[in-house]
Amino acid sequence: MSKTVIPQGYVPSAGLGLYETQKAIDAIKKCFIVKLENALQLTRVSAPLFLDPATGLNDDLNSVERPVSFDILETGSTAQVVHSLAKWKRYALYRYGFQPGYGLVTDMNAIRRDEEMDNLHSIYVDQWDWEAILPEGRRDAAYLRETVQKIVGAICDTADSLKELFPGLPVSLSREISFVTTQELEDLYPEYTPKERENAYVREHRTAFIMQIGDQLRSGIKHDGRAPDYDDWALNGDIVFWNDILGCAFEVSSMGIRVDSAAMDSQLSKAGCDERRALPFHRMVLDGTLPLTIGGGIGQSRICMLLLGKAHIGEVQVSIWDEQTKAACDAAGVVLL
């Protein structure tokens, strides 16, 4: 069920009309991609909109979301619109001959038709999807943290550049990152839900990397779901900023060091997904054919929301909304693109 909350006293334009908002979105996307490429040594590549499900390359998310599928007249086969490119990117690095320390980035557009609609979620997903081959001997938490610092730096540099163009923007970001595991959050706030823990922690620390998502905590619950066949649950996390407009922890990126053969073997068993071992992608990880990589997705609309001080994702992207969402936004003077 959709849930849209417009903050009291929210001024939708934040000094920007529709035309100026579109110019600002364009400025963010042009600026950030250059800073990200330079920070992580990435090369921009083309990406698929749909995949053959038999390859195992599509992202299964939490294994309950239904991909959009369609039949192809000429081939007589079925294709799936991507959920994300987490697995495809790793295969592409192998196929294109990338070297350790270098990677790729692409525009990822996806349809998640089962997504709940609220201020932050839409059935349309747009990300900068990136992936890089790990330098020799750097499959560790220290390298993960170094990479997070570079991404946060690129986001904050983009915010600074944007304010030069649009001085009236109300957003202030912290470059200082607090690294915390999901178990540490549970220990700090045992009575809270996972989302409440994030809000409490990020309210205090402003910018955080919440680590180790996917496995069970000591309480027997999971902080959040994560597919078993791309991130290593011990070496992943979410980049989260405090959003002053919405008054909540605001995730902009899910990322991590990817599974090696041992991590995939363990996580497939834990998730009850052993049948995936027979898929081509999974075989290439289990037998060591694919390189060891790190990667993630950075939400384009999320970054635009954050830097422009917008309260609803529909203010920075075009999608389809239910009547309840449209009514709530109309009543508050929030214009959905």
Image (cartoon, helix red, strand yellow):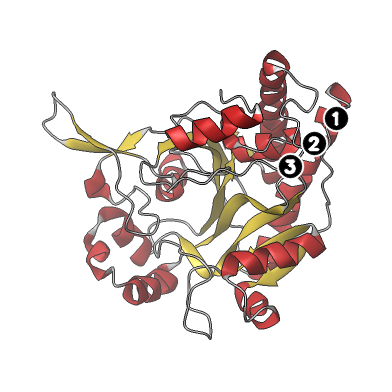
Q: Residue 271 location, x and y as percent?
A: 34, 71
**Where, by quadrant of the figure, is residue 123 drawn?**
top left
Q: Nearer the viewer, mark 1 or mark 3?
A: 3
Element under label 1? helix
**Where, by quadrant of the figure, is residue 310 drawn?**
top right
Judging by the rendered image, the residue that carries numbered circle 3 is 8
Q: Which kind of residue does numbered mark 2 sit on?
A: Ala
Badge 3, how many Cα within 10 Å: few under 14, some, many 20+? few
Outermost residue toward the front? 331
- Tell me the quadrant of the picture where the C terminus can be found: top right
Q: Residue 256 location, x and y as percent?
A: 56, 59
Q: Are marks 2 and 1 in contact (CB under 8 Å)?
A: yes
Q: Which mark is residue 163?
A: 1
Element under label 2? helix
Residue 133 visible in image: no
| Lateral position of residue 31 relative to residue 181, left or right | right
Outermost residue toward the bottom? 218
Vertical relation: 55 (above or below) 42: below
Element under label 3? loop
Q: Which mark is residue 159?
A: 2
Q: Residue 175 location, x and y as percent?
A: 83, 52
Q: Which kind of residue does numbered mark 3 sit on?
A: Gln
